[in-house]
Image (spheres, rainbow, N blue to C red):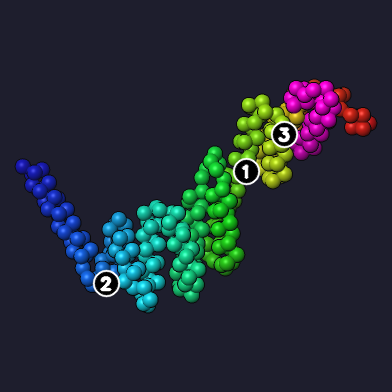
């Protein structure tokens, strides 16, 4: 009996709440609607607040309250985790109203939305590059901002994702025995990220890729390709003289050396 009574009470509250919301939607008083939309926003009832703010942007266009309504509209989208649309409107707000006190925060949130939408290292990196550009743009535009340090950290995180992506691509070529593409990819990755934490493993795999490429090549191409393997080993040795992989790879290194062009041997 008590459970039934509680259910009836909750259902009645629900119906009352729905009725109140419908009254807000049907109201012809923009001030009342704005007040209620802000209340819904503060209660994190973004699904209720958004359509009201959307309507009010037309109602208040050209008035002193237009900027305030637009700010809440963009923030409501952010609250709904619609980061692509929120980022667009945050950036538009900042560019349109540069003197508004919310302009800097809007610019930061726009950049942060791009960061939140940036994929992991295993997916298309285009949005990662876009997020880096937007974060750097914010730093350049607001160099004294309290968000600058955080933005630099976010950029570092995004660059690490790119670094890992390029490493995984090169390693994938190696494991699929596409040694020519692996050598090229490791060269690009090491050139782009010379201080990468994957440097030792990348140098090892580049040497193995170059050696296997040479071994599987026609005779006329082998000398040049063994020469590349030979140089790859020397770069590994120079960068990591204590590497545990040097001893393991030494027999292949000596074979590559003996089959390289004479100008390398002397």
Viewport quadrant of the C terminus: top right
Residue range in magenta is: 212-241
Q: Main secondary structure of the magenta part?
A: helix
Asked if 164 appears above or below 16 in the picture, the reply is: above
**Residue drawn at point x = 58 percent, y = 62 percent:** 137
**Residue drawn at point x = 78 percent, y = 34 percent:** 232
Q: Of tags 3 and 1, which is closer to the observer?
A: 3
Viewport quadrant of the N terminus: top left
Q: Extreme bottom residue here?
A: 64
**Residue drawn at point x = 17 percent, y = 53 percent:** 14
Is label 2 in contact with label 1 (beta carbons under 8 Å)?
A: no
Residue bearing the label numbered 3:
183
- Residue 9 place in picture, x, y as percent: 11, 51
For the residue carrying disc 3, how many other residues have a C-alpha within 10 Å: few (<14), some (14-19), or many (20+)? many
Q: CA distance from mark 2 to mark 1?
A: 51 Å
Residue 35 is marked as none
Q: Earlier in the sequence, mark 3 or mark 2?
A: 2
Residue 30 is marked as 2
Magenta stretch: residue 224 in it? yes
Q: Earlier in the sequence, mark 2 or mark 1?
A: 2
- Residue 68 place in picture, x, y as percent: 37, 71
């Amino acid at each position: 009996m008590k459970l039934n009574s509680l259910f009836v009470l909750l259902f009645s509250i629900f119906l009352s709440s729905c009725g109140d919301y419908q009254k807000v939607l049907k109201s012809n008083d923009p001030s009342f609607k704005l007040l209620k939309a802000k209340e819904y926003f503060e209660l994190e009832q973004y699904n209720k607040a958004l359509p009201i703010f959307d309507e009010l942007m037309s109602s208040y266009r050209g008035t002193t309250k237009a900027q305030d309504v637009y700010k809440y509209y963009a923030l409501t989208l952010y609250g709904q985790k619609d980061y692509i649309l929120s980022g667009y409107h945050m950036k538009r707000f900042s560019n349109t109203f540069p003197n508004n006190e919310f302009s800097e925060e809007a610019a930061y949130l726009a950049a942060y939305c791009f960061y939140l939408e940036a994929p992991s290292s295993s997916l298309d990196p285009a949005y990662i590059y876009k997020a880096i550009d937007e974060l750097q743009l914010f730093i350049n535009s607001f160099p004294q901002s309290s968000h600058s340090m955080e933005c630099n950290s976010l950029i570092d995180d995004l660059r690490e994702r790119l670094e890992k992506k390029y490493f995984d691509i090169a390693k994938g070529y190696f494991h699929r025995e596409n040694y020519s593409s692996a050598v090229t990819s490791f060269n690009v990755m090491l050139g782009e990220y010379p201080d990468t934490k994957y440097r030792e493993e990348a140098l090892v795999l580049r040497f193995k890729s170059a050696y296997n490429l040479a071994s599987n090549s026609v005779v006329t191409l082998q000398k040049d390709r063994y020469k590349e393997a030979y140089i790859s080993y020397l770069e590994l040795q120079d960068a990591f003289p204590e590497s545990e992989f040097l001893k393991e790879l030494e027999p292949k290194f000596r074979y590559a050396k003996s089959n390289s062009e004479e100008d390398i041997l002397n």
